Amino acid sequence: MRVAIDAMGNDQGATPIIDGVKQFLSTYSDTSLILVGRPDVVRTELARVGLSEGEKIELVEASQVMEMKDKVASLREKKDSSIVRLVETVKAGKADAMVALGNTAAAVGATTLGLRHLKGVKRSGIAVPLPSRKGVCVVIDMGANTAAKPEHLMAYAVMASIYAEHVLGVKNPSVGLLNVGEEAGKGNEWLRQTYTMLETAPVNFLGNVEGHDIYEGACDVVVCDGFVGNVVLKASEALASTISLWLKESLLSSVISKFGAVFCQGAFKKLKKRINYESYGGAPLLGVNGICIIGHGRSSANAVYNALRVARESVIVGLNNLISEKLVETQRELELHPIDSNDNCAQPQAV
Amino acid sequence: MRVAIDAMGNDQGATPIIDGVKQFLSTYSDTSLILVGRPDVVRTELARVGLSEGEKIELVEASQVMEMKDKVASLREKKDSSIVRLVETVKAGKADAMVALGNTAAAVGATTLGLRHLKGVKRSGIAVPLPSRKGVCVVIDMGANTAAKPEHLMAYAVMASIYAEHVLGVKNPSVGLLNVGEEAGKGNEWLRQTYTMLETAPVNFLGNVEGHDIYEGACDVVVCDGFVGNVVLKASEALASTISLWLKESLLSSVISKFGAVFCQGAFKKLKKRINYESYGGAPLLGVNGICIIGHGRSSANAVYNALRVARESVIVGLNNLISEKLVETQRELELHPIDSNDNCAQPQAV
């Protein structure tokens, strides 16, 4: 099996990427990697960790990089960027999966344009596994589609359930629809239509859930519009790092707590690991015709390792075949029991 | 001055409310309180803390309670509920402000129906002060209006700015519009219209902000739709309490960290206080024709004290007069420079 990775898409340079590559190759002997990026940079980094091109490592050249500040439209000017070349590698069948890092909007844009959607999918969605009290909660969509229609949200539920079950190992994952109350009639017209569709969809649908349910472990998959998902993910990241910062400041504010903190280092490390969602291995872009895992623009070596790991796992389980089969089933169900769908605007409703 | 409070609206009974009442009365001698609820319950609680009806405490009887599970529609059947009687007390001019606790949807419904809106306001919004790296960030709306139009969002920006400046003491508060990117063209049609309106509104508008900016202190006021605000608030509360839980579990998992934690108690308390938004004193429902502060359904005595404190402060500064004056100015500005407004649906757009 071959997995391709964008060797340039990291805020902190290629070092953590190549460290993650080394960790991955020494763990999994059945997979070779294709590194996409500037040859000089990649070769220097490989030499640093004692690796070189060969049977396990192939280099695909790309002279440009989509920076974090670049808009999606810049893809047109940056045709030799690492993300564009990465997608081409998968499209040409040279790699079975890809790991994109860095500019998420560019990764979504390049992948969707290059690989197109799976049959039956109209919009792809970013599924982010977040830590919850009961283990993990996969939230889809985190920003690929900020005006998701009911049919998009239903496909998200199906795709994220398959990902949770077959890649993350969650048995019969339960699905919640993110809303402002638990009752079936809550939210705007689109959410009410989605609720009705999910009731007959081939997923373990629990009903509406609220913001707190993401972390309290009420369900394994939370389905939402990419606008809400994006805001929640970014707010959560910032809140968690703000709490960590305040904890550090509080501990350093007195000699007594400084002394105590020395003995708590192990506990703080354990906490950090639990909060950190890097261990879940990046966020799959579900619905595109290829395996695409999107990593953070500030990925550590461990995050890169885990992104490669779930990319490999997704290929092994045949993720996209499973998704396609299930979506055909869903489509058949919908044809038997059609649901009236219209594109009404959101209706005002108090929580 | 007189402030009325719902003495029944707490998940944990009237005890924390009366404790907060006692704390308030012993701090502020210029304000008397009106307690609304079941006479037997209120009198028993008052006796417990050595208080009784008199010059500083008046009792308004209400035989019913809007439970947390009650829908807003139940207000019709519960005409003698404490929240309905509370609103009536303000409407009749017997109280200068009210503090509602418990069922937020019921509080918003009863207050909006009973007091109506300030002139020039079409929708009220719940403004929640959240702790941020730079102090406090007021997020409006947290769920009163889940399909906010541009004109509603603009009024939110104006009202929350006044609240932040005059009640929370933030000088020339900066305002951000919650979006999925910083560029002016981001988000759906309504958000783009709101952006244009905010550019000419009498507020210190910084532009679009993202989810992380709430906690990272990028601005003092964040304006958003009540759907997004509600999800973010609930997710944040759950994430913060989940992190606290995990910190405790990690510390208890080894003898060494248990030992160290004994010396860190002061630091942990300091952290808890910083995360806890109770100290900001509840969330004002801005835009209604009266001062209404909404507290949490699980308010502690300290939260009740602070809600009463900001209710008093809002009366002293003449919050609603300040809001009305500024909205007239805004209206005049809009008439001079009208902005085309239409009610288009959200347009699909990737982040």
Image: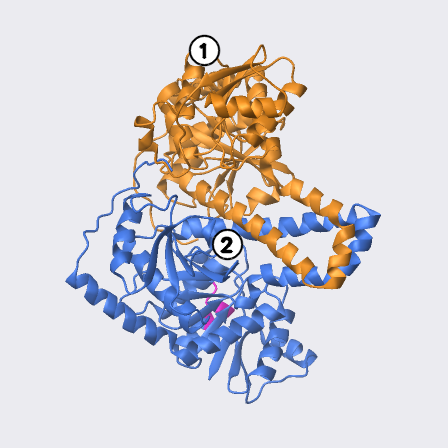
Chain colours: A orange, B blue
Which disc number belongs to residue B108? none
Quarter of the image with the C terminus of chain B is top left
In this view of the protein, can residue B223 be seen by the observer?
yes
| Residue A45 picture location, percent across and down | 56, 26
Dot 1 amino acid type: Gly
- Does the magenta portion include B83? yes
Q: Are marks 2 and 1 in contact (CB under 8 Å)?
A: no
Going by the picture, which residue comes out furthest to the right?
Answer: B255
Q: Secondary structure at mark 1?
A: loop
Give the amino acid at mark 2: Tyr
Q: Position of residue B334 (x, y in %)?
A: 20, 61
Q: Residue B308 in the image: state x and y as whole percent.
A: 52, 74
Q: Badge 1 local density, few (<14 within 10 Å), some, or many (20+)?
A: few
User: In the displayed image of the protein, which residue is found farthest to the left?
Assistant: B336
Compared across the picture, whether A81 is left or right of B133 comes to left
Q: Note whether residue A118 is visible.
A: no
Side of B191 relative to A226 (left or right):
left
- The residue nearer to you, when weighing B209 against B86, is B209
- Let me know if marks 2 and 1 both belong to one chain: no
Return the residue at label 1. A93
Quadrant of residue A206 in the image? top right
Q: Which residues are magenta?
A: B78-86
Q: Which residue is mark 2?
A: B215
